[in-house]
Image (cartoon, helix red, strand yellow):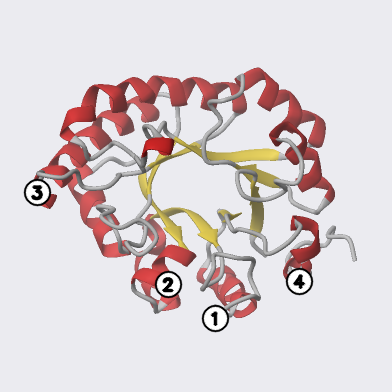
């Protein structure tokens, strides 16, 4: 059965961030992930996770000024220094939190920069990050994101991500396969994933449309998660969705996959 991790940036937002670890554990999650931990001291986060008894799975490298519209800076020629400064910062948190997977957001192709130039910058930055992460036994994830939710995002499909990983050629670099984004970008989730599973280091899920919990849209998640098991995937599945209501009221979908979920 899949190992489910609650994404605490989107789930359990009814309570403050540091209280979400315990809320996730009480709901039956054994792992947690989050997008950006940097607003909190690493020691605070580590203590919350330890008290809740959950494993911390993944977080993102710093991704620029989110409020100003940046969605990653790894492909921006003008932000190379900022990206590379974020690598040791992310590693410091990963070290304190025991996180072994860090995700890189490529970002939106900047105005006036060709996609080819942006991709070349991305590859150089990913090589830099992968080397630094490898020295500490951390895997680097690269995540394609659909261009409907984030217009202009440089990497949109699994093939885009794999092309960049081929160019980076780092043994600790993997694809982060978000089924929500892949359904919006290209569909055929099962066959697409089957074709690249050996290069996938992390999976995330949400339903389409709306990015809500499984069972609210068109993706047959009970079947797909069982198929994921049959393929031999043994990693974590991050639940990175926006609950339609209170998080706890929308967890019935977990029933077949988490024995400890409350009735």
Q: Which mark is residue 256?
A: 4
The residue lying at 59 percent from left, 21 percent from top is 96
Residue at image point 37% right, 25% down: 87
Q: Residues within 10 Å of mark 3 (few under 14, many from 20)?
A: few
Please give the residue where the numbered disc 1 appears in the rendered image: 218
Residue 39 shown left or right of residue 52 in the figure: left
- Residue 189 rendering spot, x and y as whole percentages: 43, 74
Quadrant (top left/top right/bottom left/bottom right) for the N terminus:
bottom right
Identify the mark at residue 183; answer none if there is no mark.
Answer: 2
Which badge, 4 or 1, is on the more N-terminal residue? Answer: 1
Residue 141 relative to residue 207: left or right: left
Bin the neighbour count of mark 4 within 10 Å (Cα to Cα): few under 14, some 14-19, many 20 and up: few
Q: Nearer the viewer, residue 90 or 37?
A: 37
* Badge 4 vs badge 1, beta-carbon distance below 8 Å: no
x and y percentages locating residue 53 in the rendered image: 78, 37
Labels 4 & 2 near each other (Cβ < 8 A): no
Of mark 1 and mark 2, the one earlier in the sequence is 2
SS assignment at label 1: loop
For the residues labelled 1 and 2, say whether their Cβ atoms are less than 8 Å apart: yes
Residue 112's x, y, as percent?
9, 44
Structural crowding at the residue carrying mark 1, measured as other residues with C-alpha within 10 Å and reported as few (<14), some (14–19) or many (≥20)? few
Tag 2, which secondary structure?
Answer: helix
């Amino acid at each position: 059965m899949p190992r489910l991790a609650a994404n605490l940036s989107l789930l359990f937002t009814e309570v403050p961030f540091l209280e979400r670890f315990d809320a996730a554990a009480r709901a039956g999650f054994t792992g947690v992930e989050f997008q950006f931990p940097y607003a909190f001291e690493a020691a605070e986060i580590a203590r919350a996770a330890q008290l809740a008894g959950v494993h911390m799975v993944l977080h993102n490298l710093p991704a620029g000024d989110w409020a100003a519209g940046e969605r990653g800076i790894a492909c921006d020629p003008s932000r190379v220094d900022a990206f590379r400064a974020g690598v040791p910062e992310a590693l410091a948190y990963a070290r304190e939190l025991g996180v072994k997977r860090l995700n890189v957001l490529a970002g939106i192709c900047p105005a006036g920069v060709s996609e080819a130039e942006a991709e070349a910058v991305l590859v150089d930055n990913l090589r830099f990050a992968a080397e630094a992460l490898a020295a500490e036994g951390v895997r680097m994830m690269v995540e394609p994101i659909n261009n409907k939710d984030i217009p202009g995002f440089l990497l949109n499909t699994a093939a885009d991500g794999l092309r960049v990983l081929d160019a980076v050629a780092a043994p600790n670099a993997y694809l982060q396969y978000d089924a929500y984004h892949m359904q919006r970008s290209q569909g055929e989730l099962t066959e697409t994933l089957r074709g690249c599973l050996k290069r996938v280091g992390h999976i995330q899920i949400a339903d389409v449309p709306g990015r809500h919990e499984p069972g609210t849209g068109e993706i047959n998640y009970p079947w797909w998660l069982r198929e994921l098991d049959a393929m031999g995937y043994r990693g974590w599945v991050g639940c990175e969705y926006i609950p339609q209501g209170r998080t706890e009221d929308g967890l019935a979908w977990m029933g077949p996959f988490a024995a400890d979920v409350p009735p």
